[in-house]
Image: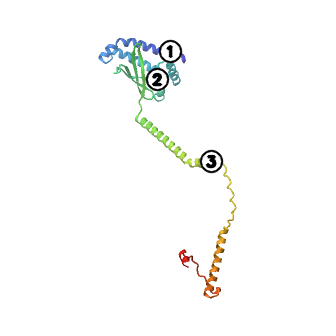
Amino acid sequence: MKQNIKRFVVLLMLTVCVFSMTACGSKNNASEADTLDPQTAGYICQVSEDLLRQICSFTEEQAIQVEADLRKEKQTALADGVAAWANVMGDTGAYIGTISSEATLNEDEEYVCEIYAQYANRNVAYKIFYTLDDQGLAPAGMSFAPEYTVAENMTKAALNTLMGMGIVFVVLIFLSLLISCFKYIHIAEEKMRQKNAPAPAAAPAPAAPVAVEEPAAEEEELVDDLELVAVITAAIAAAADTPADGLVVRSIRRASAAKWKRA
């Protein structure tokens, strides 16, 4: 299989080089008229159809191997074209034949070949771009566009919508579950904090109450007041010629210093 793949790559490069020599001669005339002469357009369509048949003859495994070999040879455009065919071959089925082909020269000075081909399952619009440089004509891009029915497009759109909505709902459910777990996370953190916290120190015992002794000066002052009352009572009783038992002291008030001076 590897030998067949290498032969394909070599044959493809030789085909492009032969076509390049033919196309270079008519480049000036094509640019002036902004169209391709029939000979150049026929060569472009012939090379593009041969290239399409060779690519569509690969199985999926062969397409993967050819793509890898082309990338090693720095043939990025051809490698992308083979990869594009590998992606759509499951929908198109086997290649049957070419329905129509047309080659033009676009505004970017690129040769464009559009081929409408028939496959087992559906028709495909195949397009390949060529650029003309110092080394000749080389493929610059390639694309496969299978034609799907309206029902198939609607089914794909519905599946994409359901998939998108499903992903959104799954993410929302995950976020709601995550938020609901926050309280349990907080409880676990509190338990860990209490577990790792140091034990509280024992409170000191209250001090024994100290007896407060009343000052002796206050007792002496109270004794002096009682003696003074007794003396005053005896003096009033002698002056009134009345026994001391008959006198009742209602109240004692301090007189001003001026009255004592007049006495």
Badge nearest the viewer, 3 or 2:
3
Q: Residues within 10 Å of mark 1 (few under 14, many from 20)?
A: few
Is residue 43 found left or right of 210 in the rendered image?
Answer: left
Residue 209 to residue 240: above or below: above
Residue 147 to residue 1: above or below: below
Question: Helix, strand or loop at disc 3?
Answer: helix
Is residue 159 found left or right of 249 in the rendered image?
Answer: left
Q: Amino acid at mark 2?
A: Asp
Residue 156 to residue 239: above or below: above
Residue 221 to residue 1: above or below: below
Residue 184 placed where, x, y %?
Answer: 58, 48
Badge nearest the viewer, 1 or 2:
2
Total of numbered circles in the picture?
A: 3
Q: Identify the image quadrant of the N terminus.
A: top right
Q: Looking at the picture, tell me which residue is in the foreground, 40 or 161.
A: 161
Residue 90 placed where, x, y %?
Answer: 48, 29
Q: Which residue is mark 3?
A: 193
- The answer to whether marks 3 and 2 mark residues whose Cβ atoms lie closer than 8 Å is no
**Which residue is pictured at 67% across the width and 68% down the height?**
216
Mark positioned earlier in the residue sequence (3 or 2): 2
Q: Amino acid at mark 1?
A: Arg
Q: Which residue is mark 1?
A: 7
Q: Amino acid at mark 3?
A: Arg
Where is residue 45, by image quadrant?
top left
Task: Give how far apart the Cα atoms at labels 3 and 1 are.
Answer: 73 Å
Residue 225 placed where, x, y %?
Answer: 63, 75
Question: Helix, strand or loop at disc 2?
Answer: helix
Q: Which residue is mark 2?
A: 80
**Which residue is pictured at 41% across the width and 21% down the height?**
128
Badge nearest the viewer, 3 or 1:
3
